[in-house]
Image (cartoon, rainbow, N blue to C red):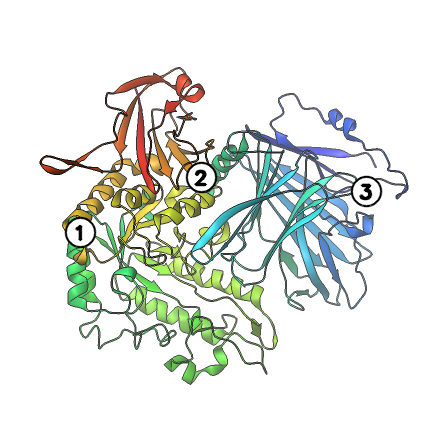
Amino acid sequence: MEPIYHRLTSAQSDIVIRTQPFAQIVYWGQHLAHFSPQDCASLERPIANGRLDIDTPITLGAELGRGLFGSPGIEGHRNGLDASPIFTTTQVEQNGQNLTITAEDKQAGLRLISELRLDSSGVLQIRHGLTNLRAAPWQVDRLAITLPIAERSLEVMAFHGRWTREFQPHRIRLEHDSFVLENRRGRTSHEHFPAMIAGTAAFNEQQGDVWGVHLGWSGNHRLRCEVKTDGRRYLQAEALYLAGEMALGEGETLHTPWLYASHSGNGLNGMSQQFHQFLREQVIRFPENKPRPVHLNTWEGIYFDHNPQYIMQMASRAAELGVERFIIDDGWFKGRNHDRAALGDWYLDEQKYPNGLMPVINHVKACGMEFGIWVEPEMINPDSDLYRAHPDWVLALPGYEQATGRYQWVLDLSNPQVFDYLLERMNWLLGEHPIDYVKWDMNRELVQAGHNGKAAADAQTRQFYRLLDELNRKYPHVEFESCASGGGRIDYEVLKRTHRFWASDNNDALERNTIQRGMSYFFPPEVMGSHIGNLRCHATYRQHSIEFRGLTALFGHLGLELDPMTADAAESAGYERYVQLYKQWRPLLHTGKQWRVDMPDATTQVQGVVAQDKSQALYLVSQLAMPDYTLAGNLRVPGLDPAARYCITLLDHPQISVVGKGGHTMRKLPGWMETTQTVSGEWLAQAGLALPILDPESAILIGFERV
């Protein structure tokens, strides 16, 4: 059969797919201005010696039955039969930049539908749907999406992490075999964010070809980058199914999660900017499209010690500092005096709140702020009225002792009684109180996740989505934050149902610089919760200046995580200053194009945001540790209009204490930016701006205004 080609195109990138007799991506790279299907003939491969006498394509399904010998895209069986399917295209439909390919294996009784959508941002969305066409069930062991990438991809970048240290990037050089990420924790996880980036050797922020993928799924997953012995390479992503978890009855269809993929010929910044544009245009939705309000969350201020009168004093002080949304964290519900009891008992603690929540809510709103509250609906403590009444509601396998994590178990959301109970309790909370915001936490991994004796981790994730979907439908004005001990559940699929992520339980500004930079590869700043914490960080016990804490929190969705009543005058003045600075610049921070800059010395970290029309920009220079060199060198500023001239302003900097005859005085950085400078965008990009000498764990904020 003669090959037939279809092309999906955008201003940034193109994808060319061979659709007959099988579905195979033959090109995924930069936009082609002069493409002709005839060009594809140049890619016909020779047959390797000593191997099969036919070419083996890397199809979207990566069928082992074709002799691919790499990681298959589909694995399963029908009681041992029909275990090696080969799919042949039966129908192709293209509507603009959307392509649907239907293929079947009549021998195995299976149908595979592949959906591809290339967004104007350059981001590809792709998923498979596998249907069983026969009466006997077909057991699905694996169902993955496979994307071939260029042979020049020699390096792989991924992200590791743990609680309080999420989104840590690492790289390997991949010339043979596979690099695999597997997550079995039942949620997106701190440890293995479901993303992978492959690229040309030494790709960096502004240079190199890179192919990035992110699996939009909040459960178990597997990602792989593989090199075949013939040099071809591919990326593969899938939901990871536990043993016996997924079987298809006749006519049933299993869809993979959506995979989001981006190619950039301009390094990691180009990839990130495409993902950010896609999310802003297609996924992120804020009620009333209002600016991201400044938060104050009570957790690190009072923990479980709830006194309504004191909380109202906190709210009054927060409003004076410029806070726009006040959130009561854990400790408001019945019997919740510590973290070892009461999860599941979602009734108001009348001993703490004898007059109910309404006096506090009314006071918060009278102060001109929105009101938010913390919940963790998916969890249950053994020491709770709910568990004593319904021990069978725990997500577990019978006959085994279920280990607690953070003194809690997980509720079985596939149990209709559990689902209805949680929905009823959330309806009480949101339906009977004028709540604007919910911080939705999830503090435990899934161990032996079982429903009716069978593995149910995948079902648990889907029921979580269903619960949030119901609440979003009923309370469209309420915003939800996804928190899972910080950054344990951050992905595109949960973002469709929430409005903000808590990036980490760690508010240490030094650690947050790395965490937030890692998160920025796939998420724009307006959905990244970033708070100014106490002078002494509660996670690491380090102390940082208000300037370093304030500037670090600026490049996200800013908030405070503390008790404002206990802050001294200097700290309070700092909180107020950075709240106002955030309000001044959030229209740019939350709409502009984000840039990360590679510096010769890795101890100096630079990030910036440039307006879409290039009229203004903000760049943050953070000195994370003692530098290798005595001088920081020049910052070459990307993203500006080369033909325009920009006024450079030092907007914020460390306050340097100088001892003089009159005692201590405060002044700005010595010998730097003493006079206003006006420089061309071209000069700033090519020659740059000499940076000042900064002490470790300090930062400066530089503004650029077109004149």
Q: Nearer the viewer, residue 294 or 268?
A: 268
Cα separation, mark 3 vs mark 2, equals: 38 Å
Q: Are marks 1 and 2 in contact (CB under 8 Å)?
A: no
Q: Are marks 3 and 2 in contact (CB under 8 Å)?
A: no
Q: Is residue 656 left or right of residue 237?
A: left
Q: Earlier in the sequence, mark 3 or mark 2?
A: 3
The amino acid beneath tag 1 is Ala
Q: Is residue 42 left or right of residue 652?
A: right
Q: Based on the displayed image, in which of its 4 quarters is residue 17 positioned?
A: top right
Q: Is residue 101 visible?
A: yes
Instruction: Please report the residue visible at 75 percent of the width from the left and 68 percent of the height from the top.
Output: 136
Q: Earlier in the sequence, mark 1 or mark 2?
A: 2
Q: Is residue 287 left or right of residue 110?
A: left
Q: Residue furthest left?
A: 662
Instruction: Please report the residue visible at 30 percent of the width from the left and 63 percent of the height from the top.
Output: 329
Q: Nearer the viewer, residue 524 or 37?
A: 524
Can you identify the residue that label 1 sits on? 319
Residue 281, numbered label? 2
Can you identify the residue that label 3 sits on? 56
Instruction: Please report the residue visible at 37 percent of the width from the left and 43 percent of the height from the top.
Output: 526
Q: Nearer the viewer, mark 3 or mark 2?
A: 3
Q: Nearer the viewer, residue 624 or 409?
A: 624
- SS at circle 1: helix
Q: Quadrant of the N terminus?
A: top right
Find residue 156 and report its horizontal and vertical position in percent: 61, 42
Q: Nearer the viewer, mark 1 or mark 2?
A: 1
Find residue 545 and report its horizontal and vertical position in percent: 27, 46
* Dot 3 alpha-carbon crowd within 10 angstroms: few under 14, some 14 to 19, many 20 or more: some
Against 350, is 573 above or below?
A: above
The amino acid beneath tag 2 is Glu
Q: Quadrant of the C terminus?
A: top left
Count the numbered circles shown.
Answer: 3
